[in-house]
Image (spheres, rainbow, N blue to C red):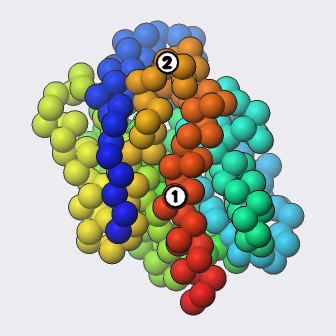
Amino acid sequence: MLYFRSTGARAWGLALLLLAACSRTPQPPAQQAPAAQAAAPAAAANPDDTGRPKVVVLGDSLTAGLGLLETQAYPALLQQKLHEDGYAWDVVNAGISGDTTAAGLQRIDWALSQGDVRILVLELGANDGLRGLPIAEMKKNLAAMIERAQEKRVTVLLAGMEAPPNFGPEYTVSFRQVYRDLAREYKITLLPFLLDKVAGVPALNQGDGIHPNIEGSRIVADTVWNVLRPMVDAAAAS
């Protein structure tokens, strides 16, 4: 398993707290999610399946690239890196804004049916933390998705998240520990914090302080690629 420093985690938590405090908008994320969930699978239900091995990135707005062009989201940048380095692999962006781990669990079978899926990048939990959902349920949902992938012999890269501090230190620490416990229990690769070196840096984020801008997305892609590339090599050799 691979571990990276979680720099910026505290600032990320503060940004989430600010977002929660300012969530009195006509259509908060919790209300937008069902419509997004209904639309996204339909749009990607019939992908252009080249028959090449695939990396599926199952996540929320951070993966979907909220506020960015599709080509600027980090899954698209991972696709570029694969192509530039000579890997004949495809990346499927299965990110939907507003998704919780429960919503991800509802989509996991669809995500794993996108052709020759070899690797699942699992990036979910931020919205659970934002809403203060029970940590036990989040862990149960993530575990079920990991198990579903492993049943299909799909290698899992688990991308960790951070919870906002307004639910107290016990919640924040327990939230973070979920990812470490799951990585250890299921013997999967862990990236402790997807937004390492990006969270809390104004120049790397959009105006909401949550979602990476173009430059921030490039850094996220680099962070993921450092872990993903050896996994692709291992999968290709097996």
- Taking depth in this image into account, of 119 and 168 the one nearest to the observer is 119
Residue toward you, 194 or 227? 227
Q: Secondary structure at mark 1?
A: helix
Quadrant location of the N terminus in the rendered image: bottom left
- The residue tagged 2 is 202
Give the crowd class for mark 2: few <14, some 14-19, many >=20 residues within 10 Å.
Answer: some
Q: Label 1 neighbourhood size at 10 Å, few (<14), some (14-19), many (20+)?
A: few
Q: Quadrant where the C terminus lies?
A: bottom right
Relative to 211, is 18 above or below?
above
Is residue 34 visible to us here? no
* Rendered residue at 63%/62% (across/down): 56
> Residues at badges 1 and 2 in contact (C-beta under 8 Å)?
no
Q: Could you tell whether 50 is left or right of 72 in the image?
A: right
**Residue drawn at (42%, 40%) of the image:** 196
59 horizontally vs 41: left or right: left
Tell me where residue 34 sits by quadrant: top right
- The disc placed on residue 188 is none
The percent coordinates of residue 110 (x first, y second) are: 64, 64
Image position, residue 142 (x, y; %): 39, 58
Residue 226 is situated, as x and y percent measured from the top left of the image, at: 52, 58
Residue 50 placement: quadrant: bottom right
Q: Residue at x 67, y 40 (%)?
A: 73
What is the x, y in percent for residue 59? 54, 48
Q: Which residue is mark 1?
A: 226
| Residue type, numbered disc 1 | Asn
* Quarter holding residue 144: bottom left
